[in-house]
Amino acid sequence: MGETKGESMSWTDRASCKGKPMEWFFPKVSVGRIPPQAEALCNVCPVKKECGEYGLYERHGYWGGMSENMRRQERRRRRDMLGMRHGQRGQIKLIDLVEERR
């Protein structure tokens, strides 16, 4: 059986931002909010969830429609859901939260 186009492509190949100016997502000066061009693309992107998960632990840029501050808040929320103390290291992925609830 052959692979369908969607199965053989990486999520990055299907991203709405592919081929767009990197400055929209990685501005030289962080303004604390998502630039309008990036926000418009992220809002309709078919891989917003995958992008956000991938970029959750990146320090710079806008990933999955989230600014650096928004990603920091999401990391904190996930850490709190798992009962981790502040300063305890480790990457928490959505699958960890699902497994923890079972």
Image (cartoon, rainbow, N blue to C red):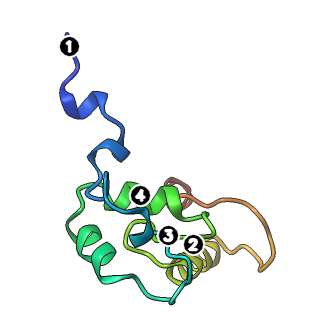
Cα gap from disc 3 to disc 4, whole angstroms: 14 Å
Q: Amino acid at mark 1?
A: Gly
Q: Which residue is mark 4?
A: 51
Cα gap from disc 4 to disc 2, whole angstroms: 17 Å
Cα gap from disc 2 to disc 3, whole angstroms: 25 Å
Vertical arrangement, residue 9 with respect to residue 14, above or below = above
Which mark is drawn over residue 78?
A: 2
Check disc 1: other Cα within 10 Å, few if <14, some if 14-19, many if 20+: few
Q: Which residue is mark 1?
A: 2
Q: Amino acid at mark 4?
A: Cys
- Where is residue 10 shown, x and y percent of the image? 36, 38
Q: Is 21 positioned to the left or the right of 92 in the image?
A: left
The answer to which of marks 1 and 4 sits earlier in the sequence is 1
Of circles 2 and 3, the one toward us is 3
Q: Helix, strand or loop at disc 4?
A: helix
Vertical arrangement, residue 40 with respect to residue 69, above or below = above
Q: Is 1 positioned to the left or the right of 31 in the image?
A: left
Q: Helix, strand or loop at disc 2?
A: helix
**Circles 2 and 1 in contact, beta carbons < 8 Å:** no
Residue at image position (39%, 71%) is 24
The answer to which of marks 2 and 3 sits earlier in the sequence is 3
Q: Amino acid at mark 2?
A: Arg
The answer to which of marks 3 and 4 sits earlier in the sequence is 3
Cα gap from disc 1 to disc 3, whole angstroms: 37 Å
Which mark is drawn over residue 26?
A: 3
- Where is residue 23 shown, x and y percent of the image? 44, 69
The answer to which of marks 4 and 2 sits earlier in the sequence is 4
Residue at image position (43%, 75%) is 66
**Circles 4 and 2 in contact, beta carbons < 8 Å:** no
Q: Helix, strand or loop at disc 3?
A: loop
Check disc 3: other Cα within 10 Å, few if <14, some if 14-19, many if 20+: some
Instruction: State whether residue 102 appears in this view.
Output: no
